[in-house]
Image: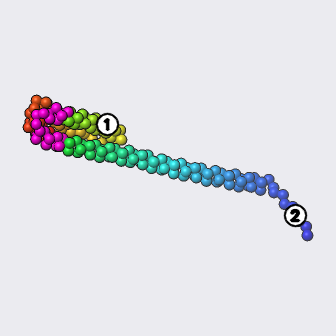
Amino acid sequence: MVLLKLQPNKRTKQKMKQIEQLMQEQDKKKVQEQLENLKLKNEDIERQLDQNIELMKRLEMEKKVEEAINRAEQLADKQRELSEKTEGSKSKDRDDLAKQQEQLNIEFQELKQELGQIQQEYKKIDPDLDFKLDKQLEQKIQKEQSSAKENLQKGKNKEASQQQK
């Protein structure tokens, strides 16, 4: 038995070379496709992370708003209590009541500043959000608190009590 040794001719060598190149190109295409898929997945993940960050910021702001509302309710309760004390008080208590009213005025101013900061932070999160504070209500509260303090200092407890309500 004679074994033949086949030597590829020039044409066959060229065809083999072409096939090899096509195989390499196919691998490059697959690698490119996989890289593109990875890029898209990373973009999706980044988008989701951005959405989660925005959601966390909104939740944090909602918590701050709730805390401010609770604080406002507590101030209103304190104001009502002071009004009741004022109505049934004697003139000797007026300095103490005036100090308590001044403290409530200060706490109200702090709450006003806090609400202003919350408003600014909300604008950063969502510029389209219309988060407006009722300026007329603020001014009315501030005026009544100041008048109540003045009336307490003058010994006009009944008038002060009415303004504290």
For residue 136: magenta? no
Predominant secondary structure, magenta span: helix
Q: In this orientation, which residue lies closer to the viewer: 19 or 165?
A: 165
> Where is the C terminus found, in terms of image quarters?
top left
Q: Nearer the viewer, mark 2 or mark 1?
A: 1
The reply to whether residue 59 is visible in this rendering is: yes
Query: Which amino acid lies under the numbered mark 1 shown in the image of this protein?
Result: Gln
Q: Position of residue 145 (x, y in %)?
A: 17, 35
Q: Quadrant of the N terminus?
A: bottom right
Circle 2 crowding by C-alpha within 10 Å: few under 14, some 14–19, many from 20: few
Residue at horizontal 51 percent and vertical 51 percent from the top: 41
Q: Quadrant of residue 154?
A: top left
Relative to 98, is 158 on the left or the right? left
Residue 4: assigned label: 2
Residue farthest bottom in this picture:
1
Tell me how far mark 2 sits from mark 1, CA to CA.
92 Å
Q: How many marks?
A: 2
- Image location (x, y in percent) of residue 117: 31, 36
Residue 53 % position (x, y): 42, 46
Residue holding disc 1: 117
Q: Magenta part of the protein: which range?
A: 79-99
Kindly tell me whether residue 146 is visible in this rendering.
no
Q: Secondary structure at mark 1?
A: helix
User: Looking at this rendering, what residue extends furthest in the front direction?
Assistant: 92
